[in-house]
Amino acid sequence: MRVVVCVKVVPDTTEPKRLGDQHALVRSGVQGAVNPMDDYALEVALKWKDAQPDLDVVVLTMGPDDARAIIKKCLAKGADRAVLVSDAALAGTDAIGTARVLAAAIRKIGDVDAVLCGVRSSDGESAVVGPAVAELLDLPQLTTCKEADLDASARTVTANREVDGALEVARAGLPALLTVTKASFEPRLANFKGIQAANKKEILGWTTADLGIAPPARQVLVTAAGEPPQRPASQVLTGTAAEVAQKLAQYLTEQKLV
Amino acid sequence: MSTIWTLAEIEGGELKGITHELLTAARSLADASGSLKVGIVALGHEIGGLVPQLGSLGADIVALADAPSLANAPADVVARVVGPFLQGQQARTVLLGHTATGKDIAGRLAVRLDCGVIADATELAVEGGKIVATRSIFGGGMWSRAVAAGNGAVVTVRPRAVTPAPGQPSRSSETLTISVADGSTTRRVETLELKQETSTTVSLGDAEVVVAGGRGMGGADKFGPVETLARTLGAAVGASRAVVDSGWRPHKEQIGQTGRTVSPKLYVALGISGAIQHLVGMRTSGTIIAINSDAEAPIMKVANVAAVGDVHEIVPALVAELSRQGVGAGA
């Protein structure tokens, strides 16, 4: 069986983010990291592989060539191989365009039983790439999964989904696409043996020509960007607890907030 | 673009609040343009009774996909039924909620319509016949304006970004029927169980008021003031990352970069210092009130009202004061 985990390299969330040309995120010179939600998706696949060692776990990413170093960390954790779709023509590709490229790569990888994605990226935050890939590949989807169990013999996947404050248990037949949210477990860290093994694992580099597709046309253009407006200066309340409480209650009433 | 389309979210036979908001947003865009119409697709079983309400809330066209097999349809089925219909209508703008349901469908529908997606919009406009949306990016740290440049866009609109307008019962609408092709409703996903979480009475994402607690509360057993004030205000309970990481509160209550982004009418921060990772998850709230013993804490700078003092003294006094005014009585 084969599982593809879609991974995005994002600016490390502790670094301040900047916008450059065409209001696109400046990525060069910014420390990269695996998108945190994708790390959970990879962990779900690796848990499956723990139980079923012959499972072929393929990491798929679209990004610049320097994403290789980050992808290698996924291989060190236990993924079998990786595909990096890298093409100068893909710079600035929007969410649906990205989904088109990922879907084409998944087709080329072939015989894929499950696709796992993080529910959203920490930099784009649209949460639509996973479902768009599912539509392009005509797969059912289970989104915002906290945990997922693979039943290889029944060819199903059963997931605990977090949906608007409720927990849903849902099952889909394979092949299927899952998006994974912050799970109840922590993603594993690579050990020394894994890091050594990763040096021998393959990272295939594909271009849009290799996928037999044209770079997707941009459907969404960012025309402006900026800092949020400053809020008016705080009104500071001091005094005894009773005085402060009384002033707060008055404010809430006057502003019709209660 | 001649019609702005939306999709109704229906639960238990009733329209969810986001549907009012989307119709209000679509109606104001259409009215501002003078030429656009508002269409809404409603999909489910025995939902014909909703047509007058959808019309009164602003829809010119109500398109019904009504079949037993469409009750609680999963996203792939929705896309298969709604996609071809909207393609036939040459839809160029589709507004969905940035909700669990909306996010599940947005990407699939955009693929069907060969258009883009603009996610989590907080403001909408039509310029030169194209939809333009303002969204907050990097967790609210910046905003950007995106325009549908190609074949249009599916736009997901942040819940509560739009204040729903009251309905006008005299408004009428045209009703269309969406044909449901054989095989298009085949289920590939099965719901086995649904457990409503009961620990919070109000869910964080939908809440108009959020009361959140941080490390300044002092311990897992010292969250009483957060819960009491939340009950009084009819609010959802939130938490900072520090207290979730410490195991004082469950992750589902976490607000901020690695938790939820909320944008309630009123946000009350109790004992939260306001690390940037927390601020990005709540800075678009309407009014922010912070109670903290440290007047210099970052949260006090973004708050509309910063109350300096001990939360364990101020909150009980505030609850008492509010209940004297009849707020939260019976809660």
Image (cartoon, coloured by chain):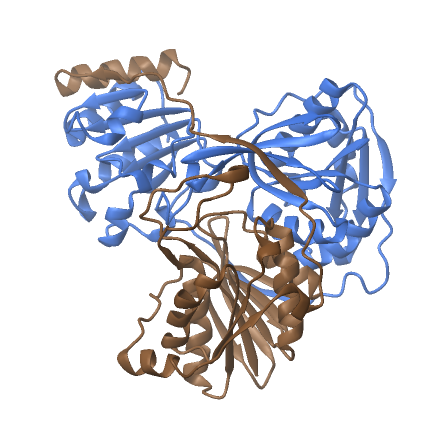
In the rendering, at what x and y percent does residue B194 appear?
A: 53, 59
Report if residue B60 is visible in the image.
yes
Tell me the quadrant of the picture where the C terminus of chain A can be found.
top left
B277 relative to A111, above or below: above
In the rendering, at what x and y percent does residue B293 appear?
A: 15, 29
B76 relative to B145, above or below: below
Q: Residue at x 18, y 30 (%)?
A: B311
Tell me the quadrant of the picture where the N terminus of chain A can be found.
bottom right
In the rendering, at what x and y percent does residue B256 appear?
A: 36, 43
Q: Residue at x 62, y 70 (%)?
A: A106
Which one is in front, A43 or A87? A87
Which one is in front, B200 or B281? B281
Chain A shade:
brown
In the rendering, at what x and y percent does residue A104 appear?
A: 66, 66
Chain B shade:
blue
How many marks are shown on the rendered structure? 0
B2 sits to left or right of A123: right
